[in-house]
Image: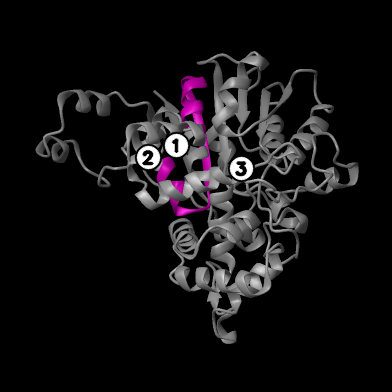
Amino acid sequence: MSSTRTALLMGKMGFGSYCQRRLLHQITKRSRVIMERKQNLLRVVGLHVEAPSDTSVGSIDCDRIKSFQQHVPVMAEMVMEHLQPKNEQLYIDMTFGGGGHTRNILSHAPKARVICVDRDPTAISIAQELAKSFSPGQILTCHSKFSLIHTLLPELGVTPGTVNGVLFDVGASSMQFDEGKRGFALSVDGPLDMRMDQSSNNKEPTAADIVNSFDEQELGFIIKRYSGEKSAMKIAHAIVEARSAFGRISRTQQLADIIASAFPEILHYGRKDKLKRSSHVATQTFMALRIFVNNELNELNNGLEVANHYLRPGGRCVTLTFHSLEDRIVKRHFHDIDLDTKPNLSLRQMRYNQVSTAEMKQILNKKWEPMSKRIVVPSPSECESNPRARSAKLRAAVKS
């Protein structure tokens, strides 16, 4: 790929310096072409974008706010144990969602200040409603994705090196799965959207745009890369055949049925999750599409860079991930491991491999100090009471 084309792709996808230097080199040529095609969809005349009419900031009704406020965050006590919030300090909840973690921070430190970030307008509405229960300026909101937040934090009076703690609870939130019209869930039929920001001014491609525009090889690559689905090409073939025969795929249940048609009926719920419960055969494909539509992995890279930039020395960053690719990005950030490097090389191995002196200095001058060598996982009792915690992995680090 030419340097001009590479620079163009970086600009389109909003890569920070970390992604420019590390992540882009590990993405294959086909992956780069697919990401370019996703961006090119924005320029297609008559792009079909299904956006709910009530997702603008401030339009959510009180009953829905009350229902979302009942959300129980995953590993709440373990998060607080690692974050250790204190009064008069500043924290950023990078994935506000239903606000469970922000409420926990303020219950542990009633005089702390929290900036609530989310790309979902519904979540921002919940945060604005929550702010009314606290002192003016104690809760501030920021409607943004991670790759743009560095342009908005200064407007809130936040300068680099002043934040005491940052929290990430990545992936889709419970309220997004619970609402059928968001297009995330298999259990409830809705428009095939899957964008976390479904406000009317967001014209980015939906999941429907992806499954109706990409060819079989590209769909298979997306499904395989972002979910590890072994039958990715079989599923991609079924999608292409179905849209050729029946027209546009626009509903979640429609896509789930198409995916299921690629397998014998006995296998439709033949897979088991970590709790040994039956899982629909389309679950992995839905996850892959969601990750791709929202550019979640690249956004997470950018978010961790922003966190390190704004944290003060000694400030803490706590992450909750639910997918192995997310956890790999966090782990390599916290351990200062290049994404291209073979895993778990010692300094002696790096020297044997003739790593340059400059690279060795960069390795030794770490940006993070992990709080634990091992990941923290939820207890069996929490997984039983809150099944969505079953895949959670907690990592925490202190800024050096």
The residue wearing badge 1 is: 9
Q: Residues within 10 Å of mark 2 (few under 14, many from 20)?
A: many
Q: Residue at x 77, y 56 (%)?
A: 181
In front of the other: 127 or 246? 246
Q: Tell me how many marks there are.
A: 3
Q: Residue at x 65, y 51 (%)?
A: 206
Between 75 and 197, the one nearer to me in the picture: 197
Q: Earlier in the sequence, mark 2 or mark 3?
A: 2
Rendering quarter of residue 281: bottom right
Q: Which residue is mark 3?
A: 42
Q: Is residue 256 above or below residue 41?
A: below
Residue 122 position by quadrant:
top right
**Mark nearer the N terminus (1 vs 2):** 1
- Tell me which segment is drawn in magenta: 303-330
Q: CA distance from mark 1 to mark 3?
A: 14 Å
Q: What is the three-letter code of the residue carrying label 2?
A: Leu
Q: Is residue 265 above or below residue 56?
A: below
**Residues tagged 1 and 2 counted as in contact (Cβ below 8 A):** yes
Label 1 crowding class (10 Å Cα cut-off): few <14, some 14-19, many 20+? some
Give the amino acid type for the residue marked by disc 3 in the picture.
Answer: Leu
Q: Residue furthest front?
A: 45
Q: Nearer the viewer, mark 1 or mark 2?
A: 1
Q: Secondary structure at mark 2?
A: helix
The N terminus: image quadrant: top left
* Location of mark 2 (residue): 24
**Residue 155: percent from the left, percent from the top?**
66, 15
Q: Position of residue 55 (x, y in %)?
A: 79, 42
